[in-house]
Amino acid sequence: MSRARPARRLGVPAALSAQRLLADRGGLAFSVLFYVVVVSALSGLWRAAAGRAPVAGYSAVALTWYIATSEAAICAIQIRLIEEIGDDIAAGTVAVELLRPLSVVAVRIAMQTGRALARLACLIGCGAVLALLVAGSPPSGGAVLLAVPSLVLAVAANVSLQHAVAAMAFWIRDARSAWFIYQKFIFILGGMLLPLEVLPSALHTAALRLPFMAMAYAPARLASGHFEPGLLLVQAVWLVVMLAAATAAFAAGQRRLQVVGG
């Protein structure tokens, strides 16, 4: 019971954040429009590339579902989250939040995850319709079903790692450069723009061992028809690691604030 109560309490800010996002119909509509435009362009390019022969084992249909899923996993999250967290740390907002009974990083991760999952539901719904219209049914119904929990794990892992990275603002006061670099890792090593199998062998192997693959590649790989349940386990492990890293980083930052009086 004692462990269940904090979880239920964290569900409140997550639900409230989701409700606020859904209530902002204008902002949500813009997010969906941006997502549809990006997916239409990228999937069109990949379908053209795979028109005559599969690309790294992906057919044109598989690539369409891959892009629709990978883009949804990333576009669901606030684009400048690292930068905004860093600004809150530098401005002292986080220092005030540390006075609350619940862990500040746990509350923030819950809020951002709830917000992202609400946006994700809208994006992936539109993405699935678009993929059906332009490419056809997904290559594997079973694999697509696995992609649903995989997307949830992807969002939670991504939000957690972004908090861990943003915590550097406790020391350097500016996380903007970290946000820029982080995004580039997600684009390539996370498999957002292209399947990791397209990368050179050495880089492909390295990417599979990094946490970024759990944030876009894993659900996209499943949605593209590859029935690989082990990807969910890999994502779950990375999620635990990222949550621990974010918790440890914020705890160290809190100790620094107490020492220097920030």
Image (cartoon, rainbow, N blue to C red):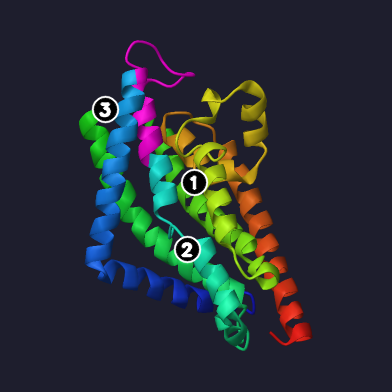
Q: Does residue 147 appear in the picture of this structure?
A: yes
Disc ID at residue 113: 2
Name the residue rendered at 62%, 89% in the picture.
99
Which region shows up in magenta? 49-68
Counting from the top left corner in percent of width and height, residue 93 is at 55, 82
Reading the chain from its start, which is encountered first: label 3 or label 2? 2
| Residue type highlighted by circle 3 | Ala
Q: Quadrant of residue 23?
A: bottom left
Q: Secondary structure at mark 3?
A: loop
Q: CA distance from mark 2 to mark 1?
A: 14 Å
Residue displayed at 53% across by 59% down: 159
Residue at (59, 75) in percent of width and height: 89
Q: Is residue 60 magenta?
A: yes
Mark 2 secondary-structure assignment? helix
Residue 126: x and y, percent? 26, 46
Quarter of the image containing the N terminus?
bottom right
Mark 3 and mark 1 residues within 8 Å of each other at the beta carbon: no
- C-alpha distance separating marks 3 and 2: 30 Å
Pointer 3 residue: 135
**As shown in the figure, which amino acid type bears the numbered disc 2?**
Thr
Q: Is residue 148 left or right of residue 201?
A: left
Outermost residue toward the top in this view: 52
Q: Is residue 225 left or right of residue 19?
A: right
Residue at 39% from the left image edge and 51% from the top image edge: 75
Apparent side of residue 161 relative to residue 15 in the rendered image (left or right) = right
Tell me residue 84's x, y (percent). 50, 68
Residue 10: where, in percent of width, then height? 52, 75
Residue annotated with mark 1:
150
Disc number at residue 111?
none
The amino acid on which the numbered mark 1 sits, given as a three-letter code, is Ser
Q: CA distance from mark 3 to mark 1?
A: 22 Å
Number of residues whose C-alpha sits closer than 10 Å to that of mark 3, classed few (under 14), some (14–19) or many (20 or more): some
